[in-house]
Amino acid sequence: MPGTFVDVEIASQPDLWERASALLPEVESRLPRTGERVAVVGCGTSWFVAQSYATLRETRGAGVTDAFVASEFPAGRRYDRVVALSRSGTTTEVIDLLRALDGAPSLLVTGVEDSPAGALASETLVLDFADEESVVQTRFATTTLALLRAHLGEDVAAVADQGRRALELDLSALLDADQVTFLGRGWSVGLASEAALKTREAARFWAEAYPAMDYRHGPFAIAEPGRLVWALGEVPEGLAEEVAGTGATFVHHELDAMAGLVVAQRFAVALAKGRGLDPDRPRSLTRSVVLSGD
């Protein structure tokens, strides 16, 4: 299969993370202030990024931070700021939520200028340089997270260097698997969910995701020869050995979890191509979910 948009977009991520970090002095006044009570919302990939950022922000002591899928935002709960993530700015549930906030402080992070969601948010931050042609979202999500991590004081340049290593890793030994379960801890739980989503979207492949410590509480039962158990970030003590005892293959790269997600993105695309699928245009999916009436 010839090169795809998503191949180019995956490969561009480390450079875009550094570009987003460099943008921080220009945009930090729009981002959550230390001590604010913040809700971060999105759908699909954006929800998983919201989960990761919420955990990071609380861990860094920047303030109470909750993550919600946009359709399930708790009406009546008060926040100092709501941060909505939407690549297109056209997602129905995000638009409905911003409309329901009725002027409460909100920030939309999007890849598109002049979007319907942008018209409803108090402020908008446009990362148009990270927008994508592929339906399958990769670089917009991670670039958004890179900017938010930079705002928390993290060394994004070092993460970008690890992302470049992730682009070079050989995946061939993993591509004959018949199932994969992604695991995360802390802020990488959201990224594990995103890795599983990418694999389902692009390759129609059986992929699951769990918090690593919870994996032993039931999901462990499906581990067996021919299947992968893939950890992003921190690995609980003893888990690799327990997985090996089932005959499943334990996968873990010594990378920042966001760089590790790049490896999982590449895995998903390689699986799709091996199955003769177009990873840019997954079956039944569109770039944005816009429901009837919007």
Image: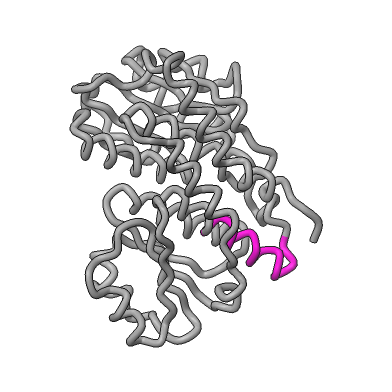
Quadrant of the rendered structure where residue 31 is? top left
Q: Which of 259 and 92 is in front in this view?
A: 259
Residue at (51% x, 35% y) in the render: 17
Please say if 142 is above or below 147. Answer: below
Q: In which quarter of the image is residue 94?
A: top left
The magenta region covers 264-277
How far across and how far down the image is residue 82, in percent?
33, 24
In screen coordinates, is 215 left or right of 179? left
Question: At 34% from the left edge and 38% from the top edge, which residue is drawn?
Answer: 53
Query: Which quarter of the image is occupied by the C terminus?
Result: top right
- Residue at x 48% of width, y 23% of height: 22
- Classify residue 247 as left or right of residue 289: left
- Marks counted in the figure total 0
Q: Is residue 92 visible?
A: no
Which sits in the foreground, 230 or 77?
A: 230
> Percent position (x, y) of residue 161?
50, 44
55 left or right of 232 in image? left
The residue sitting at 29% across, 30% down in the picture is: 39
Figure check: 222 above or below 64: below
Residue 49 x %, y %: 41, 42
Q: Quadrant of the N terminus?
A: bottom right
Q: Is the magenta stretch mostly helix, strand or loop?
A: helix
Left or right, 68 with reference to 6: left
Q: Does the magenta stretch include residue 269?
A: yes
- Location of residue 159 by image quarter: top left
Q: Where is residue 135 in the image (x, y as percent from the top left)?
A: 64, 45
